[in-house]
Image: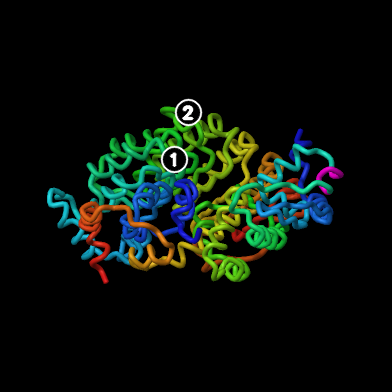
Amino acid sequence: MADNADHIDGDDNEDVRAQQNLIKIKLKSSEGGIYECGLTAAKMSDLVKNMVESLGTDAVVTTEPIILGNEAVTDAALKKIIEWVEFHWDDPPVDHDFEDEKDRRNEELSHWDKQFIDVDDQALLFDVIAAANYMDIKGLVEVGAKHICSKIRGKSCQEVREMLKITNDFTAEEEDAIHKENAWIYAKD
Amino acid sequence: MNSLDRFGDDLCEELLSYLSLEDKFRFECISKQWRRVVFESQTVVTIDGNTGRWFHPMLGRVSKAELKRKMEYKPTIDYPLEDTAIELLVKYCSHLTTIYMNFKNISVDTIDKFFTKFGPKLKSVNVFGFNESVDQKWIEKWLKMCVNMQSFTNNDRPLYNVMIQLVPKIPVLFKRLNSIRLDVHTLDEDINGLMTALDVFADKYGHQMKTIGLIVWSSNAVIIDAILTQLMDSLPRMQTLISFELSFTADSQVSSEDWIQLLTTIGINCRQMKSLDINRLTLSNIVVGEEPLTSNLLQPLRRLTHLYLLYMT
């Protein structure tokens, strides 16, 4: 009755992933730099995954570099991204039956991720996030988002604008109106 | 390129989605882009009326006094304080899909507005209760609005009663329902209501159910017996179940034959099962004795990853 129900994806699958990661593919940044990356790791990017799968055979994949044309994919950003996927490719898969969206969102970043994403050069940080978004690496975008949110937590609006170099495009009247409506929040300290 | 302004609305919304709701209110005035996107991603709300600072999980450190200040700018509101918060949710957060809420201090009008706006959008409904004065007709109306609900959890009696009556009355009201966790507050006299509901439930929802939890607040042998009998009958119709929880009170008596029969039923029928949780509600007087588990009992459950068996007789 339950033939296919008894089929279990287990260790075999993990072995295949490890095997595949020994295959190195080449990724090319928008600045022209070419970098090697394990196949399983690179496939954490949905963009790369789709490109590889449309190319078909491993032979093609390992010779020709995959071109990442978005301007955010600089040499420095791509190197960071490869570092991240090479560290995370063997993370245990998410069990959607039990993983609660709310819990996952509230979960703190791991020590490794915190150190990884805490870069002084804000242009590089934003490049990494924009490139991860372009390459469709959801986990890395989440790391960047959590990092930014934790940096601005509890700050004043002006401090946040200065930190993140945001232009205030409200007129004085508009800003006043919002302030008035939300005065209860600012007034509490 | 070191300015956050470089990001489009979609990415900006994703980045800001990890802010607390409190920060979202505070940062609304940073720029027009932030104002556009900052509330878009608010999909989960937790309000627990049992804690002293009922607003705490939602707005961080906001106290009642501070909320009063907000109210001063909205002089027309004459509801109790708690209603203001719900009004804010209705005003700002258009995409709520998940609620963990206690409506005990909220007026009928406000709850009605809340469900009118969010009911059809809600995927996960976890309600700790309504005020005792709220008529069950209202609760039925609100529950009926949650047609896209996938997951339902109740904690109090009125909501339990409404759910039990609704299931047989409108059998496929919740097309997407696949997870239900019921606090069972059944009295002797209406045990048949529960039996009927479980039976209809197995028929109409059995093929899609992933999670069932029954927390039985009764040590009455008749009730326990009826529930176990009904489960033996219903579980074979729920072959997609991946998680099952059954809790009885500490003083309830269940024979080891009954346990073996229940576990065997699960073992034979629910091959997808990943989590099995059978326990007493208090752990004070667990007697670990003659263990009803045998290796071939659960052997068919090859996918099991979570096992809690705290109810040994």
Residue drawn at x 63%, y 69% is A112
| Region of the chain picked out in magenta, as a range | A58-62
Give residue B31's position: percent from left, percent from top.
Answer: 35, 54
Determine if the magenta segment contains residue A61.
yes
Alpha-carbon span between mark 2 and mark 1: 22 Å
B225 and B249: which one is in front? B249
Vertical placement of A145 versus A1: above or below?
below
Q: Mark 1 lies on which chain?
A: B
Tag 1: amino acid: Ile
Indicate which disc residue B172 carries.
Answer: 2
Rate crowding at label 2 as few (under 14), some (14 to 19) or many (20 or more) other CA atoms within 10 Å.
some
Q: Do labels 2 and 1 share a chain?
A: yes
Say which element carries label 2.
loop
Vertical placement of A178 versus A153: above or below?
above
From the image, give the main secondary structure of the stretch colored magenta.
helix
B76 and A52: which one is in front? A52
Q: Mark 2 lies on which chain?
A: B
Q: Say which residue label 1 marks.
A: B191
Give residue B26's position: percent from left, percent from top.
Answer: 32, 60
Give residue B10's position: percent from left, percent from top.
Answer: 48, 46
Which residue is situated farthest in the front direction here?
A: A31
Q: Which of marks 2 and 1 is nearer the N terminus?
A: 2
Residue drawn at x 42%, y 50% is B44
Rate crowding at label 1 as few (under 14), some (14 to 19) or many (20 or more) other CA atoms within 10 Å.
some
